[in-house]
Image (cartoon, rainbow, N blue to C red):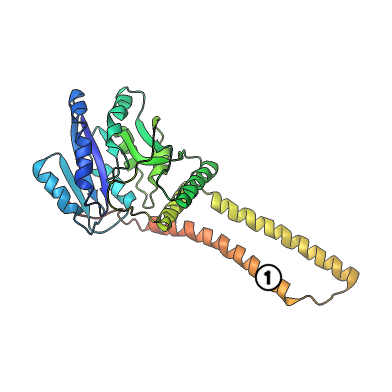
């Protein structure tokens, strides 16, 4: 039985040896269950010494492997590359910053080895240490996704999860370029057990996720797993068409009854600008979906490997 721990890395030089050491703290448990360990680092085009640190570990431990990208392709590409290059019967995804505690692995394995679950996933029950504004928008995002998408996306869900090879293969069968793993995990189905834990702050370094990058990532989720924005654009169009029809009737009746008094240009300008803004908003929604289609039909690879060791 082989277990693969996939660790996507982007400028995580300081955390590479720490996450390795934390995983191996569970070695006694792995030995008791007859589990062989494979630790796969996926370097997402880091500009620091991440690759060098991984190679140092490889020199002393043959269980450590490396896939290094030619440039930064993003965490979603790193996750896909890790899954594609993993050999394990059971595969776990975890962040290098130790916000995904490796100490949970024995409990996760006990649950999945029972045969009752295909996946054991984790979710944070608190966001202690996060900026309040980011936490508020994160909760709003999950609330919105539950309303507009049929795919289960749990509030506070982490990418940290342990999966069977069957589930991994199902995820790999989805080769879409625009990826949102939290949605993909839910879309493929399989029985999942959720483990709750308190938020853990990253051990070293700074997060690579700015508010803007998280916002763009949330748009990937909304547009990848819901057509609600397109429906909203249609509803807005129908609503304002009805308003315009009522306004035309009102103007005709007013003209017949009171004549045609001169109207002020400021009010007319405001109406035109408002309607123009609504139209551009709806066109923008269509443009976002069209851009996703454009990227998909080009069929570019999700990532390019510079080095595989």
Instruction: Look at 49% across and 61% down and name the residue there.
Output: 287
- Asked if residue 238 lies left or right of residue 193, the reply is right
**Percent of width and height locating residue 290:** 47, 59
Quadrant position of residue 59: top left
Q: Pointer 1: what residue? A: 270
Q: Which residue occupies 64% across, 70% down?
A: 273
Label tally: 1
Quadrant of the frame with the N terminus: top left
Q: Is residue 295 above or below residue 35?
A: below
Q: Relative to 13, is 112 above or below?
A: above
Label 1: which secondary element: helix
Q: Which corner quadrant of the image does residue 181 belong to? A: top left
Q: Residues within 10 Å of mark 1 (few under 14, many from 20)?
A: few
Position of residue 211 in the picture relative to residue 46 (left or right): right
Residue 21 is situated, as x and y percent measured from the top left of the image, at 19, 39
Q: Is residue 87 visible?
A: no
């Amino acid at each position: 039985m082989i277990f693969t721990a996939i660790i996507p890395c982007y400028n995580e030089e300081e955390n590479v040896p720490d996450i390795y050491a934390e995983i191996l703290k569970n070695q006694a448990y792995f030995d008791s269950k007859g589990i062989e360990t494979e630790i796969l680092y996926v370097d997402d085009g880091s500009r620091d010494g991440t690759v060098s640190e991984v190679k140092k570990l490889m020199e002393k431990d043959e269980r450590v492997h490396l896939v290094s990208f030619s440039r930064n392709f993003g965490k979603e590409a790193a996750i896909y590359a890790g899954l594609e290059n993993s050999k394990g019967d059971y595969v776990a995804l975890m962040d290098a910053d130790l916000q995904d505690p490796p100490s949970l692995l024995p409990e996760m394995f006990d649950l999945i080895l029972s045969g009752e679950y295909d996946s054991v996933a984790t979710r944070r029950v608190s966001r202690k240490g996060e900026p309040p504004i980011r936490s508020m928008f994160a909760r709003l995002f999950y609330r919105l996704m539950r309303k507009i998408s049929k795919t289960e996306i749990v509030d506070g869900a982490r990418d940290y999860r342990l999966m069977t090879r069957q589930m991994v293969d199902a995820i790999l069968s989805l080769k879409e370029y625009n990826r949102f793993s939290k949605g993909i995990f839910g879309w493929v189905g399989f029985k999942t057990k959720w483990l709750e834990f308190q938020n853990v702050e990253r051990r070293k370094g700074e997060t690579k996720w700015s508010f803007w990058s998280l916002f763009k990532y949330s748009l990937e989720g909304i547009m990848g797993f819901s057509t609600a924005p397109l429906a909203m654009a249609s509803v807005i169009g129908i609503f304002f068409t009805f308003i315009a029809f009522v306004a035309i009737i009102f103007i005709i009746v007013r003209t017949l009854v009171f004549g045609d008094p001169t109207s002020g240009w400021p009010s007319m300008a405001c109406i035109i600008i408002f309607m123009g803004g609504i139209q551009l908003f709806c066109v923008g929604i269509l443009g976002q979906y069209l851009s996703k289609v454009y990227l998909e039909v080009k069929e570019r690879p999700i990532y390019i490997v510079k080095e595989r060791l």
